[in-house]
Image (cartoon, helix red, strand yellow):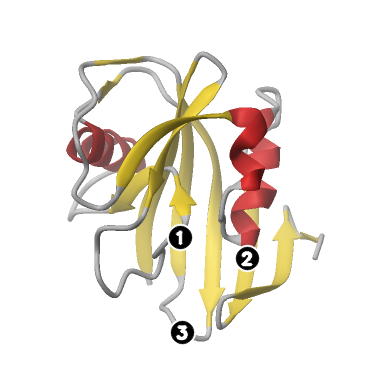
Amino acid sequence: MINTTLCYIEKDGKYLMLHRVKKSNDLNQDKWIGIGGKFEQHESPEQCNRREAYEETGLTLGKCNYRGIITFVSNKWPTEYMHLFTCNDFSGELKECDEGVLEWVDKKEIHTLPLWQGDKIFLKLIENQNTPFFSLRLQYADDTLISAILNDEVIV
């Protein structure tokens, strides 16, 4: 079981996206994802989110919104609990990322990028700032989404 964070940093109607093209044997190879990574020992979700954002982007996050928790189940990877954040309060200068290419992408164009099927579900949820905190369970067989359960209701 793995705990991770994922943050969608927002500016001017755009999300800062990471195109994962630099690491070999990357389960996210060629996908576009938000910013995040694995917890270190004794970190809270908020601490992990801030550290990972700084390490990957050079940006220091201010107040973030904890939006939900995603449970990933797969026949290829260990179960992962991903803590999902959005943030439009940040400072600093964007730096090059060793995991991929960082790019500000218009929110209206995000769904045209190569994304995981489950990411499209939670991106729609976070588009509405009034969506309450949610729990989403995504089950994959190989790289195909076979089940999605939102707040204990089957949606896929």
Label pair 3/2, CB-CB below 8 angstroms: no
Is residue 134 something that shows in the picture? no
In the image, which disc is placed on residue 76? 3
In the image, which disc is placed on residue 129? none
Q: Residue 109, position in %: x, y? A: 63, 35
Crowding around mark 2 (Cα neighbors within 10 Å: few <14, some 14 to 19, many 20+) is: many
Q: Earlier in the sequence, mark 1 or mark 3?
A: 3
- Could you tell me how far apart the alpha carbons at marks 2 and 1 are, in whole angstroms? 10 Å
43 relative position to 122: left or right: left
Along the line of sight, the residue nearer the viewer: 149 or 35: 35
Asked if 101 appears above or below 138 in the picture, the reply is above
Crowding around mark 3 (Cα neighbors within 10 Å: few <14, some 14 to 19, many 20+) is: few
**Residue bearing mark 1:** 81
Q: Which one is closest to the eye, mark 3 or mark 2?
A: 3
Residue at (56% x, 76% y) in the render: 143
Q: Which one is closest to the eye, mark 2 or mark 1?
A: 2
Looking at numbered disc 2 in the image, what kind of residue is underneath it?
A: Leu
- Could you tell me how far apart the alpha carbons at marks 1 and 3 are, in whole angstroms? 15 Å
Q: Please identify the quarter of the rendering in which residue 71 is found.
A: bottom right
Looking at numbered disc 3 in the image, what kind of residue is underneath it?
A: Lys
**In what element is the residue under mark 3?**
loop
Residue at (65% x, 23% y) in the render: 129
Residue at (53% x, 79% y) in the render: 74
Q: Residue 105, position in %: x, y? A: 50, 31
Asked if 34 appears above or below 128 in the picture, the reply is below
Looking at numbered disc 1 in the image, what kind of residue is underneath it?
A: Tyr
Q: Please identify the quarter of the rendering in which residue 154 is found.
A: bottom right
**In what element is the residue under mark 2?**
strand
Q: Earlier in the sequence, mark 2 or mark 1?
A: 1
**Residue bearing mark 2:** 138
